Image: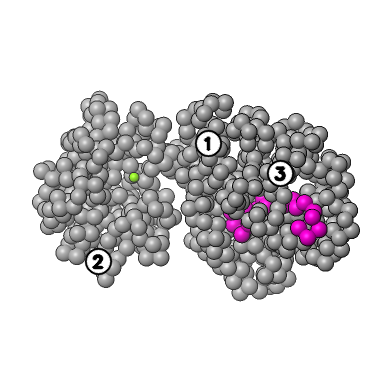
Amino acid sequence: MKAVILAAGAGERLAPITQTLPKALLPIGSESILSRQIRQLAEHGVQDVYIVIGYEGGAIREYLAASAQPCNVYLIENPSYKTTSTAYSTLLAEAHVSGEAFYLLDGDVVADGLVFEKLAVLTGNALLYQEKSISSPEEMKVAEDGGVVFLSKTIEDERALGEFAGIARISAEASSAFFTALNKIAQDFYYEVAFNEIASEFPFALETLTEGSWIEIDFVTDYLQAVRMFTEQRDAATPAISEQVLLCPGPVMVSKKVKSALLHADIGHRETEFIEILTRCRAKLNQAYGVTGKDYTNVIITGSGTSANEALLSSYGPGKKLLILSNGEFGNRLIDLARCHELDVNGINFGWANKIDLSKVEELVATGLYDALMVVHHETSCGMLNPINELGALLKKYNVDFLVDAVSSIGAEALSVEEANITFCTASANKAIASLPGLAFVCGKKTAFQALKEQKARTRYLDLYKHYEYEALTFQTPNTPAVSLFYALEVALDELLQDTVAARKEQYSYLAGLVRERLKKLGMQFVIEESDMSCVLTTVYYPQGIDVEAFHDWVKQNNYVIYRGKGPFLGKAFQIANIGHVREEHVLSFLDMMERGFQMTETTASVTH
Ligand code: PLP
Ligand code: MG
């Protein structure tokens, strides 16, 4: 048996790791990806391995020459690897394998030995794929049309059977037709297009791989994961961190691309490189806040969401009369912040999970006593969406400033600072914007930022005017920024703006709908009316008679992380959030597992509250 390994690519998405090393030579424990593939092929009956090299091909040649190989290894050079695609690289092996059966492997696939066992028992054309893995426009997907297999990166999720693992077997009968097809297709195509060309005449058998038995290394995070999966670094007792599914209202799971953005070249924060990324992030952030005109700007502060709230209240608040509304933990925290800075505040507490009484608010605002009102857009502690547009209209009528904490709604719920006539609006990176924690934002009217010049700051680090002055006027930050997080943020904002907030809201609502339908079917009770809930999360009472901590642990052991209730819900309710990179499969398997968890941790009886 023969095999062809495609190892010519530059692995640009793995830069800077691949700046001097081709992907195939990245170490997985004591061997490289390539020598691991060669060993596994040899162990499963392959005698001749043809490796197509290009980027850093010399390094591969030297590496292989430096040690004895378990089978015959031949190198084929693709000098035009930069401008050609995998179809062209594969074609270069034609003279060696055409007319014979052979395995075709992507050089960036790391798999366990079982995968090669599967391969070794196959006879006709076959390809390996993983059922319904996480969707991404990067991945080659497998589908069937009228019983004929075809592969493409642009198959919608619903139609895709799963993700092609980059491992296939071409039969002796199909081999020359495969090369004829490769010759026919343009050289900038993927070799998978040639599979499609021959699939009706020479059908492909499909073999499934389980998650965790293989991985394709595109991004740095894939590489780190591969090392965890296939070396001693993996601790069998505790699941790899990245295998946990976070159903928490932030920090959330982020895309591979967002994580990979952390590996950027080192830059100085007073140099143009940082000025550029800061400026781009601020422009994109404005879009996320629904800004269309020129009246609003924003600042990015290195800190958690609270740093934005504290910068706002401590900078804007002195000398003002504030009305802060609360219906849960995060409203209470705003009142607490105002008191901490000894501001003149009237904190109105409607009670946890109670709706804001707009007539009561109007009564207070109409007194003319207040300069500003502050409220949380989405009260994360119970999942209630507060009526910011109605409040905005009301405050406009009475000419009162409007301050909003949108930490857990931005990116998921419709939010336009212009439409709601918001003066200042805070948010953070690590919830529905789906980036990493550590950056917080204040978006506000330019005139309002400028007016802060007259205020005496109460803190140095969180002086909002100083942030505005630096960021808007000199495109710098007053202090050392968390540089790497800006790289991640920009990718997350790109992904958000490309998807659109409206489409994200639709997707989150769909996921939340799956959760809510199942909980209702089980007879469980929500802490608020469904019509008042955001699309971000669901807060539900535990069924009676279960051991709450045992349930939480059981869920965790199964690699899911849910959120415990706070305040009056502590020990009584829990939260299932569905923002960030939570997929339908995650939600569905969590719900099944949750049901089993209730049974396992039941101490007395029945699922009612
Ligand atoms: N405001 C709201 C609405 C929140 O949900 C949170 C955190 O969950 C915060 C403020 C505080 O954010 P951080 O914990 O990042 O300081
Ligand atoms: Mg790849």
Pick the front one: 30 or 443 = 443
Q: Which residue is mark 2?
A: 148
- Quadrant in which the C terminus is drawn: bottom right
Dot placed on the residue nearer the N-terminal end, 3 or 2: 2
Q: CA distance from mark 1 to mark 3?
A: 25 Å
Do residues under tags 1 and 3 come within 8 Å of each other at their CB atoms?
A: no
Q: CA distance from mark 3 to mark 2?
A: 63 Å
Q: Is residue 29 visible?
A: no
Report the magenta residues as a range: 396-415
Q: Which residue is mark 3?
A: 447
Q: Which mark is residue 277?
A: 1
Say what amino acid the circle numbered 1 marks.
Ile
Q: CA distance from mark 2 to mark 1?
A: 47 Å
Give the percent coordinates (x, y) of residue 535. 61, 62
Please rate how many residues cluster around mark 3, counting C-alpha atoms within 10 Å: few if below 14, some from 14 to 19, many from 20. Answer: few
Say what amino acid the circle numbered 2 marks.
Val
